[in-house]
Amino acid sequence: MLSLARRSLEAHFRGEPPPRLASDRAEAFGETRGLFVTLRKKGDLRGCIGTLAAHGDLTRGIAEYARRAALEDPRFPPLAAEELADCDIEISVLSPPEAIAGPEEIEVGRDGLILESRGRRGLLLPQVATEWGFDAETFLAEVSRKAGLPPEGWRDPDARLWAFRAEVFSE
């Protein structure tokens, strides 16, 4: 998966179509699942894009979201070809989300969070809480901020909250 993501970016910068695996059916990698691709340049976040709504097979999704993380993350300018060598790739393959009520149901380091409220949505991968040293309540405050809500936005009676897990692969 990591090789496919890197080769997809290399192909993009050469103006070629993305590579394909000999067997790129979803069955080769298990059930269709959501995924995120994260790029880090010398340890700093350089792009991260993915989807909860799995569509198509996993190998096509990896190629697509690797390119999108490099070129379309609105927080960063598009990655230049010469930057790729300095980037590490991380792939997070997500489990289906499960509804939760609050911090008592969150295991930091295992769970990622999704919050929907007031027409907004925020998602944080499980590794974010570990990287930043969040406890469960801080993690909820941060996913609220990610959704464009105040830190206590997760407490809104109309807010919907889910936890998910991720299999994470990185270079």
Image (cartoon, rainbow, N blue to C red):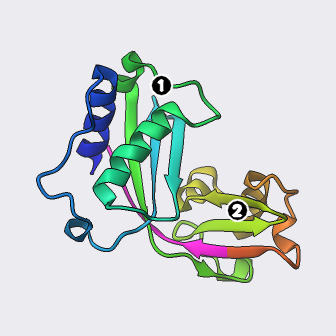
Q: Secondary structure at mark 2?
A: helix
- Which residue is more in the foreground, 134 or 160? 160
Considering only vertical position in the picture, is 39 above or below 126?
Answer: above
Q: Which residue is mark 2?
A: 139
Question: Where does the image place residue 109, in percent across and percent down from the top left?
Answer: 54, 66
Q: Earlier in the sequence, mark 1 or mark 2?
A: 1
Q: Which residue is mark 1?
A: 79
Considering only vertical position in the picture, is 77 above or below 54?
Answer: above
| Quadrant assignment, res 152 | bottom right
Q: How many numbered circles does the render carry?
A: 2
| Quadrant assignment, res 83 | top left
**Badge 2 local density, few (<14 within 10 Å), some, or many (20+)?**
many
Residue drawn at 74 percent across, 67 percent down? 116
Mark in the foreground, 1 or 2: 1
Residue drawn at 63 percent across, 35 percent down? 74
Is 30 contained in the magenta span? no
Q: Is residue 93 left or right of residue 156?
A: left
Q: Amino acid at mark 2?
A: Phe
Is 164 contained in the magenta span? yes
- The image's mark for residue 123 is none
Highlighted range, magenta: 162-171
The CA span between labels 1 and 2 is 29 Å
Residue drawn at 28 percent across, 21 percent down? 14
